[in-house]
Image: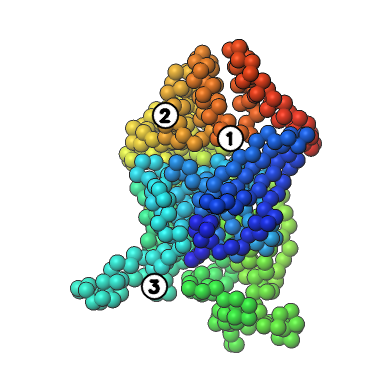
Amino acid sequence: MSQSLAEPRDAAPIEDFAHAEFSPQPGLTYYVEQTATGVVHHEKCVDAAGEAIYDQGIPIALSVGSGERGRSYLIERGGRLYVSPISWYTKAGRWDFSPGYAVDHNLRFDRKVSEGCMACHAGRVALSEEDHDRFASPPVHEGSIGCERCHGPGREHIAFRNASATGRQEDPIVNPARLTDGRRDAICNQCHLQGRRRVVRSGRSEFTFRPGMFLGDNWVVFLKTAGVSSGTAAAVSQVEQMHASRCYLESRGILGCITCHRGHEVPRGDEADRVYREACVACHSAGKTECSEDRARRVAVTAADSCVVCHMPKFPASDVHAAQTDHRVLRKPRHEPQESGSEQRRRDDEIVLFSEPGAQVDAREWERARGIFLAERAASGGTADQAKRAVDLLAPIVKKLPADVEGRYLLGRAHEKLQQNRRSVQVWKEALEIDPRHEDTLDALAVHYHDLHDLAEARRYYERLIEINPEKSQYYGRLAHVLGQLGDFQRAIISAERCLEINPSLSQSHSWLAEVYRGMGDAERAAIHESKLKQFQSLQKELPRKSPGP
């Protein structure tokens, strides 16, 4: 954790910069360049003849990760942070797409880093006073995860140790080992339990959790599955696996993260075998439930008689936030068959609340979080039934929460799914009265008016979006389309050219500009964009075709 985030020049050198490139498909190459001023990540596209269409280089602001499994990189533009599509994978010893990226899901340099990401990957950040998910300059005050993340604010602790505190009998610093309920594991779970979705409670933020609180005091967390069953173990976090283990269930709250993991060091080699075995033997000792396997057979497998080699085997994780060591602590390791389609659909329909020993669930926050979760599901390709349930949950709650922007934004999304456009616009405008710079709500209204061909309103909202976030190519492209329909071709051209400056991979922008320039009689500029378009088209012919669907 002390190496969780740093500027590239300060990060421990683990990468191979001598062979710093990869090509995920014909014509597309990513490479890393070290310059006198820092590290630059490039996306280069060439046509079928090998001629460059574009070569976009983006300076890297921050390196993320200790390098144990790998390292990813962040870009800073206008106070917002974005993930680079290029990551280093230590064990494989190679560069490749960042987690979550693929040829058919390539967010390039536009994948936003949220406040939630930074809350776990940085010690302390400098937040913008104007916008959500935006940071001041410089964005990070403390790169590594420090003492206060697990022990709480240190001011009163220092005063107590300096004997300047009056009337206090105990050191106010939080010692996780002295906590006996869900607040102990909440210290680890604040970052290590991703779940299926974490919803920040109303009136709180990603940064308001303090050691000594329950996780549910700050977030409502939905698990990926009610219990880790066949085919799901590699897809969920260590916390979900541990909570499904017989060891955890039968310990009645005694077993937790720090039962096995030391907070201030990571044991290696023979030391790791000894430490983890001692943690197991503390419960599974003579007279209790000792290992039934003959010791001679055990040491034939591992000379250190390691428990975890047999009972917590490693497997490939499905994403960067999933476990690599099986924390179900199975008596006998078993093969994980693939889930059937019906099992996956059934699991997708589950809404499972994470529960903590000793914690009280706030019913209103639980209902609000369910509504937000269902609205997001409905808006991203879900069902009308999910949207209706979201409306039923959120509509009465936001009336009682006058500052709940997120609740109103997603309530509007649910109304939109149900084609209740008048209601969606009403709640979105209520959200903007609370926060006039709420980017998601402005985007929703811009698209809404664009789709209705209310071009004057669409233009107004796109211009507001660009004022708030001038680094998003999508807003310029849409505004160019609106301005063109309004007949304001000069401004439309400026917007479309800016769109291509930010994202030169958009062949459709070249097509549109070629047509507009040709219509305006500017043959020279039209020819430039027609040439680029032909290059993209030649490359497209070289790409392998997807097999037709059934």
Which residue is rendered at x = 66% and y = 48% of the image? 31
- Which residue is identified by label 2? 464
Q: Position of residue 456 (x, y in %)?
A: 44, 18
Q: Position of residue 447 (x, y in %)?
A: 50, 27
Q: Which residue is more in the foreground, 203 or 113?
A: 113
- Which residue is identified by label 1? 503
Q: Position of residue 172 (x, y in %)?
A: 31, 71
Q: Kindly report which numbered mark, 1 or 3, lies closer to the viewer in this rendering.
A: 1
Label 2 SS: helix
* Residue at mark 3 to residue at mark 2: CA–CA distance: 48 Å
First-in-chain label (1 vs 3): 3
- The answer to whether marks 3 and 2 mark residues whose Cβ atoms lie closer than 8 Å is no
Compared to 351, does 540 lie above or below? above
Compared to 121, does 283 lie above or below? below
Q: Which residue is more in the foreground, 469 or 515?
A: 515
Is residue 179 toward the left or the right of residue 528 in the image?
A: left
Amino acid type shown at disc 1: Asn
Where residue 295 sits, quadrant-wise, is: bottom right
The reply to whether residue 103 is in sight is yes
Assess disc 1: are there few (<14), some (14-19) or many (≥20) residues with their C-alpha within 10 Å of its C-alpha: some
- Which residue is identified by label 3? 175
Which residue is rendered at x = 52% and y = 58% of the image? 9
